Amino acid sequence: MSDTPLISLPPAAEAELVRRLQARDEAAMTLFYDRYSAALYGVIFRIVKAEDEAEDVLQEALVKIWHAFASYDPSKGRLFTWVLNICRNLSIDKIRSRQHRVGSKTQGLDDSLTAQRQAAPTTFRPEHIGLQEITQQLIPEQRQIIDLLYFEGFTQSEVAEELNIPLGTVKTRARTAIKVLSKLIR
Amino acid sequence: MENIQEYIESGILEQYALGELSPAEQAGVEAQVAAHPEVREELLQVQAAFGLYAEAHSLTPPAGMRERVLSNVLAQIAAPKPAGGLRADVDAVAQANSLTATPQPTAVPGEAVVRPMASAPAATSTPAWAIAASVALLLSLFGNMLLYSNWKSANSELVAMQNERTRFATTTTVVEKKLGELRQENQVLRSDEFRAVALAGTKTAPTAHARVLFNPATHKVYVDVRSLPALPAGKQYQLWALDKGKPIDAGVLNAATATGEGLQHMKDIASAQTFAMTVEPEGGSVNPTLSTMTVVGNI
């Protein structure tokens, strides 16, 4: 699969998968899994940071994707964007409920920030486009902000508070990072 | 929107893509997206950028996960399962919940379950009604489980109590019967009309000892064993009354009587001077086997 980046999944192939899922073709879920599981699992795992929980969330997400598929509108965005959001939301719900169980949210934020900084290099095995390439394109400050926003579920205000920088700076860095990433797609 | 560029630069599209916005703010963004192709183009770029970032972090799931996850998912999405009581009800409620959620806020199709254009709001912006509904569902679930388990234990307690009652009734019947027997025995033993006849062991069983209670007026006969030798298989003790030397059958002793458990009411005897017991084949004999005579006594 590493020679088939998901973003560039041919529109025809994606449309075919969407058509089969809309037709309630259960076998298409296997195809869906083979296409997207690595990307979705990567995001889920980076958010929940535990293999067993990541597996639970992925399973939950697939069931949800199946049941909610009628509400996916191809004219409004890519299938990948849609399913990614489902996975990301379920994962963030998971860690929020976990933090809620454990207690203070502030504690959770501090912990997760340091944990993420340290855990990243050893456990992550980048595939597809390659983490290396993206890392080289983004300066550390940009990457840090995107990680907090995307994998920790922080709001922009929370990032500003966490890093003790103005909200405007967070917005600028996030936008610049997105511009850099957009250029990589083209 | 007068200054589209300013709108784009405000960072609201990133917030939308990350699911930070309230449903009302999302609706606002979607209106802008629908009205301005530049905004739409920009949003698609933001989403694609996050998509790329996510994809760059792809991880091959651990070995064995594919089979586990796929089989569980396929089992869960398989055509309607047979109604399975509580579990099925819960599923139905959950399903109905997600279905009713779909057409919720006007400008946000697919709200709460999924967001078609951009990221769904994370937990912070989950609508209050959804939280309330989830809480209500959980509470109702919990309540149902509680009721179900209470009902189950109450049911088994009831069964246990019914069993107990049946057992008690049986015991009572047995006790009443026993009591009736004892009363009767007591009457016999206390009655002046009954004559106690001691039967002593013969040469074949010198330690054997029994008693006959005989009422010459009513002709009733009771036997009361103190000690008799154990019987060989297929044999029974038989009581005889000797009237002027002629043996008259007074009935066989049941096993309980032979081991001395209590009085046994025997056949009525009109007149007798002597009582004796012999060992006879089960069911008794017409004439006594004199060689087996165990106890004998005169009135």
Image (spheres, coloured by chain):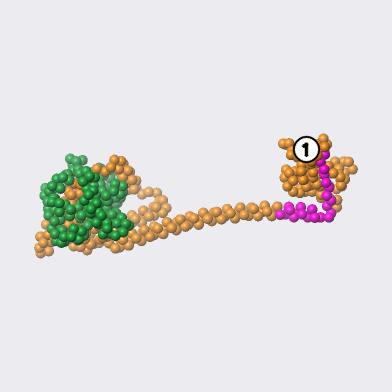
Chain colours: A green, B orange
> Front-most of B197 and B221?
B197
Q: Residue at x 20, y 55 (%)?
A: A149
Residue A81: image location, x then y, percent: 20, 51
Residue stretch rendered in magenta on the structure: B179-202
Q: Residue at x 61, y 52 (%)?
A: B167
Which quadrant of the structure image shows residue B6? bottom left
Q: Is B59 left or right of B157, judged from the image as shown?
A: left
Residue A151: image location, x then y, percent: 22, 52
> Front-most of A96 and B115?
A96
Q: Which residue is mark 1?
A: B280
Q: Is residue B17 in view from this perspective?
A: yes
Residue projecting furthest to the right = B244
Q: Is residue B184 magenta?
A: yes
Above or below, A32 against B121 in this view is above
Q: How many marks?
A: 1
Q: Residue at x 10, y 64 (%)?
A: B2
> Front-most of A45 and B272?
A45
Residue B34: image location, x then y, percent: 16, 59
